Image (cartoon, helix red, strand yellow):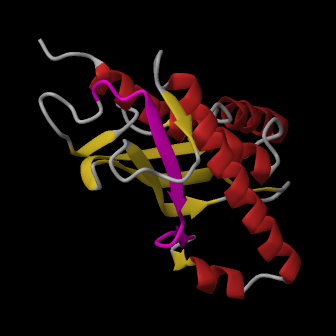
Amino acid sequence: MNLLRNLTLAFIFLGAAAPTLTGCAPYTVVQQSGPPSALQGAQQITVSFDWSQVLVLGKPEAAYLAEKTAEEQADFQVIKQETDAAVLQGLQENGGPGVAFAVAAADPAAPSVVVQYLEVQTGIYTYVVNLPSKVRTRFLWSRDGKVTDVIETRAMVAASLTTPSDHQRMGMVGRLLGKAAGKFVVKSQAPKK
């Protein structure tokens, strides 16, 4: 009986390993410009990342890191960089034709987006405890130095045998977040009818 129960649980957890965006829509619109959208016609969008307001497991980043070893603190900094790179990759792959995203010095008049991290759980995979990696972000789109559009996104990837590394899961989460924001850009680029 225990074997059957354990196999059932294993299949449930393996099924939950697939990356998911929470809810039906990949993003929630907080503020939207237009019509026409301020993003319509944008060909180059500068991307920057803001971790200053993030809560990690419900604590400010400094409080979270204060409980960690120097090695764990350094590892978290690597995870942040990898997550940023994955978000950028998701944007680049899903922002639509003719739209380029790059991390560079921004021209205040040019379209830009700040990826603001709000909540992070890097997750853990062990034989006893498994916590998914999940992130909630806000994308703040600007043009001419003014915020024009704001969306919130959430993504989660379960910790499992196929996704044991928090680095792997956070990369997957980052790409999902970038993909959701890319879909917003594609929708904003479409002329309103």
Q: Is residue 90 left or right of residue 107?
A: right
109 in the magenta segment: no
On the rendered image, what quadrant is the N terminus found in?
Answer: top right
Q: Quarter-wise, where is residue 88 in the image?
A: top right
Q: Is residue 130 visible?
A: no
Q: Position of residue 76 (x, y in %)?
A: 74, 67
Q: Position of residue 52 (x, y in %)?
A: 50, 72
Q: Is residue 70 left or right of residue 29?
A: right
**Vertical position of residue 119 compared to residue 17: above or below:** below
User: Who's the residue at 81% across and 35% down the image?
Assistant: 162
In this view, the residue in front, 20 or 179, is 179
User: Who's the residue at 47% across and 15% down the image?
Assistant: 97
Q: Is residue 191 left or right of residue 145?
A: left
In this view, the residue in front, 77 or 28, is 77
Q: Position of residue 77 (x, y in %)?
A: 74, 66
Q: Quarter-wise, where is residue 163 in the image?
A: top right
Q: Quarter-wise, where is residue 189 in the image?
A: top left
User: Who's the residue at 23% across and 36% down the image?
Assistant: 38
Magenta segment: 40-56
43 in the magenta segment: yes
Q: Is residue 100 left or right of residue 132?
A: left
On the rendered image, what quadrant is the C terminus found in?
Answer: top left
Q: Is residue 63 visible?
A: yes
